[in-house]
Amino acid sequence: MNPQTADVNAAIEAELQLLDPAVRASRALAARLLDPEFVEVGASGRRWTYEEMLAALPELDGGGGGGEDGPRFEPSRMSGVVLAPGIVHLTYETDFRGRRARRSSLWRRRDGETGWRMYYHQATPVPPAE
């Protein structure tokens, strides 16, 4: 497997973990996947920092509050590209209880680290007519 494909696949695997309610409910698990410099612009337009996201994640949509059988984000059409060594850009869509969003994430792996961490995420609502 080519190294770029391996990097994209690793970022996709990490992104899917962040959509898992069990990971969202655990500060320790989520903290391993979010970069300390993480920023998100959510579908609501709110800007989130690393600490704000870790504190709120269990209660946000798709979080562990609904339990393992609770509502989940359903991702589709996820793809990625390596922008530079240690930087992967993912794009995809999610559906959560009929609300769709287009999503974009930047994942980075710093020198000396083995795991990928989400550095930036943005969600944009999809109009109901689409």
Image (tube, helix red, strand yellow):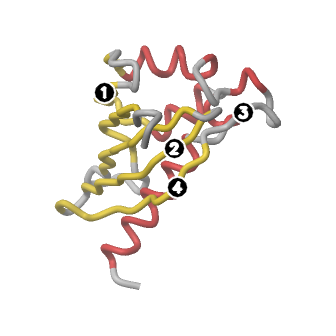
Q: In the image, is residue 67 above or below residue 9?
A: above
Label 2, on which residue? 94
| Residue 31 in the image, given as x and y percentages of width and height | 50, 32
Q: Earlier in the sequence, mark 2 or mark 3?
A: 3
> Which residue type carries mark 1?
Val
Q: Earlier in the sequence, mark 1 or mark 3?
A: 1
Q: Earlier in the sequence, mark 4 or mark 3?
A: 3
Q: Earlier in the sequence, mark 4 or mark 2?
A: 4
Q: Which residue does the image show at 52% across and 14% down from the upper left?
A: 55
Q: Quadrant of the N terminus?
A: bottom left
Q: Which residue does the image show at 34% across and 36% down from the upper left?
A: 121
| Residue 15 in the image, given as x and y percentages of width and height | 49, 48
| Residue 42, picture quadrant | top left
| Residue 76 in the image, given as x and y percentages of width and height | 52, 55
Q: Earlier in the sequence, mark 1 or mark 2?
A: 1
Q: In the image, is residue 53 above or below residue 4?
A: above
- Residue extending farthest bottom: 1
Q: How much space separates mark 1 and mark 4, taking CA atoms?
A: 23 Å
> Which residue type carries mark 4?
Ser
Q: Residues within 10 Å of mark 3 (few under 14, many from 20)?
A: some
Residue 39's label in the rendered image is 1
- Residue extending farthest left: 84
Q: How much space separates mark 1 and mark 2, taking CA atoms?
A: 19 Å
Question: In this rendering, which labeled residue sits more in front, label 1 or label 3?
Answer: 3
> Which residue type carries mark 3?
Pro
Badge 3 marks a residue whose secondary structure is loop
Label 3, on which residue? 71
Q: Which residue does the image show at 82% across and 36% down from the upper left?
A: 69
> Which residue type carries mark 2?
Thr
